[in-house]
Amino acid sequence: MSNSDPNHRNRPPSPDAKPLPPSSWAKKTGFRPKFSGETNATDSAQLALPPRPSHPAPAIADLEAGRPRAPANGIAPATDKVPPAAPVPVPPKDQTAKKRRDSDGGTKGSVPSTNGQAPPPATAAAAPVDQPQHARRASRHEEVVDVEDDGFVPRHSHMKYELRDSPGLVPIGVYGIQHYVSILGSLILIPLVIVPAMGGSHEETAMVVSTVLFVSGVTTLLHITFGSRLPLIQGPSFVYLAPALAIINSPEFQGLNGNKFKHIMKELQGAIIIGSAFQALLGYTGLMSLLVRLINPVVVSPTIAAVGLSFFSYGFPIVGTCLEIGAVQILVVVVFSLYLRKISILGHRIFLIYAVPLGLAITWAFAFMLTEAGLYNYKGCDINIPASNMVSQHCRKNFSRMKHCRVDTSHALRSSPWFRFPYPLQWGTPVFHWKMALVMCVVSVISSVDSVGSYHASSLLVASRPPTPGVLSRGIGLEGLTSVLAGLWGTGTGSTTITENVHTIAVTKMGSRRAVQLGACFLIVLSLVGKVGGFIASIPDVIVAGLLCFMWAMLTALGLSNLRYSEAGSSRNIIIVGLSLFFSLSIPAYFQQYGLSPNSNMSVPNYFQPYVVASHGPIQSKNGGLNYVLNTLFSLHMVIAFLVAFILDNTVPGSKQERGVYVWSEAEVARREPAVASDYELPLRVGRIFRWVKWVGL
């Protein structure tokens, strides 16, 4: 950090000084930010501090911090005479370094421990101990961390509870429930989109919601216990939403009338089971350990961002059907998450943590009052009569407002039972078709890429070190197995790590795995109450669309935030990310619009037309199944973003620090250190099963 104190100024390097260990995960990769964003430094360019020069190096502007800083190369102009260095007291080895964090608890930078060498100028250790004017305590915007010899930061004092902390049943119960409530939107919104698209009723929507809650609780327990062991919630992922909609809108399903929902659900189940089995094979065979060497932040970032950007055709077009409610929903969530995010109540940032559930409750109450006030009552019109059967032009004109603005049109809450146990194969025996299964196999690779970024980001917050490649493979393998369970139970999508969970950990500062496990048990109990699913299924679709606008925008931002591990200002990375994002929107648009006339009258709504590409895409070979697979895959935004970024990042030359290569712990070091073994070792001696498999586990 820059500082006005003369004892804190940067000094030129000394030829005989030993390299300092990097002070953060980003610097562990060799990352050193520069003014221009470009890099020509070597990986070993971090040096200890030499004697202080008589004339300090001229400062240049630091655009990010808004303060002067030393030149990027760290070398001061040459001087004729350099006075001898004054003796500097050697700090103790366990000296702590101070890190400045932003208002959300994230770290801006860190300063490494010197481990017996002269301290860097950013620390206040250059002054003698008996000078109190230079000693100060950590301010409310700073955190104190311990830095070990190898540069890893094992303890994060800004977290309330870390990975292995267990403060007591009541605290972890409260924080565990808080953890799930804060990501409520990620858990419940996907069934509210796909079930109506499959022709399901409100009662069937309630059943799918209860199934999603049950499977999410079970798979989270399995993942935290036998997977990566990080406090990551498993649930329906937006990665699976686009391919699910593409399968739902396949040409062979357009003419179905009776039991359309169950027929399509069985097709989805078969595709998810095959794709998830492929993901499990990818993890447990160690192939993921090889693939992860080619997956870096420059690949993860545009891939996840494209997932959020791909649903722009669904979000606001649905909000516009009842603008006074949908716009209020978006406005309330934005105000809570941005303008009121710093307001704390009893030490908790209520509006930031619960932006989605609070916004849902307020907007739903607002819509209920408008409905009860008779704003959407039209004389002689009945919402239960289809618009095509209405004789009055006045009723047909206002049918859309009655359908989308009223909150009393759903009967799911009244018809739902009080107790219902979700069971496997509840919709029937899954149906397997190779073309749909092949699409899901490709999507499972994208899901694994998403999880790689989540593992790395969450480990920086709660664990002593990042996982080893073997632990990562074990986590991906178990995600495949748990996603198979999601296919057997019939959730409509695969189960994977919820990306928004990393943001929740940073905001709530709760990283205890026991808290998330206890919250998962609460989720399982909640799923057995049928009225809960009926209540969620009663949310009006315009409110769902308003929440999804916020969730997809947040998912896009979380994807782009992976660039912080690389040199985001590098022209190489800028071009790769820009090309990936542009072609992820442009190429699918070509496939989706190919062969469609401007006035084509399709049987599906306009916002679902991009997912009907299998019937009219540009690839028209003699093999209909191959046409289906290729037209569908190339119409998925995330697939194009992944392919472009993956190819360019691994073929365009760039240093490790420029690419921001993820740092994973080495297996030998992990086995040798008790803290790392406690973080990732499997319980109940289950880890012995993997000892003969060197590429999985510690």
Image (spheres, grey):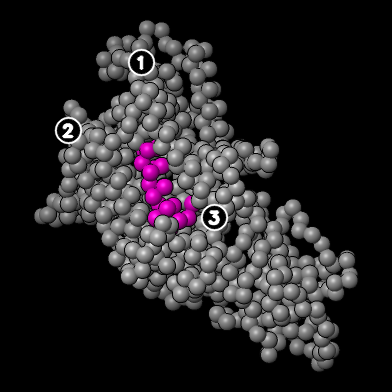
Residue 396 located within the stretch drawn in magenta: no
- Taking depth in this image into account, of 101 and 198 the one nearest to the observer is 101
* Magenta portion: prevailing SS class: helix
In the picture provided, is 210 more to the left or to the right than 200?
Answer: right
In the picture provided, is 41 more to the left or to the right than 404?
Answer: right
Type of the residue with mark 2: Gly
Does label 2 or label 3 sit earlier along the sequence?
A: 3
Res 611 seen here: no
Which quarter of the figure is the C terminus placed in? bottom left
Work out how far the residue at label 2 is from the one at label 3, CA to CA, in angstroms.
51 Å
Question: Where does the magenta region start and end?
Answer: 212-231
Residue for point 49% across, 42% down: 518
Q: Which residue is mark 3?
A: 163
Mark drawn on residue 255? 2
Contact between marks 3 and 1 (CB within 8 A): the answer is no
Residue for point 70% across, 61% down: 144
Residue 221 located within the stretch drawn in magenta: yes
Q: In the picture, residue 697 is in which quadrant? A: bottom left
Work out how far the residue at label 1 is from the one at label 2, CA to CA, in angstroms.
25 Å
Res 536 seen here: yes
Work out how far the residue at label 3 is from the one at label 1, CA to CA, in angstroms.
52 Å
Q: In the picture, residue 345 is in which quadrant? A: top right
- Taking depth in this image into account, of 693 and 149 the one nearest to the observer is 693
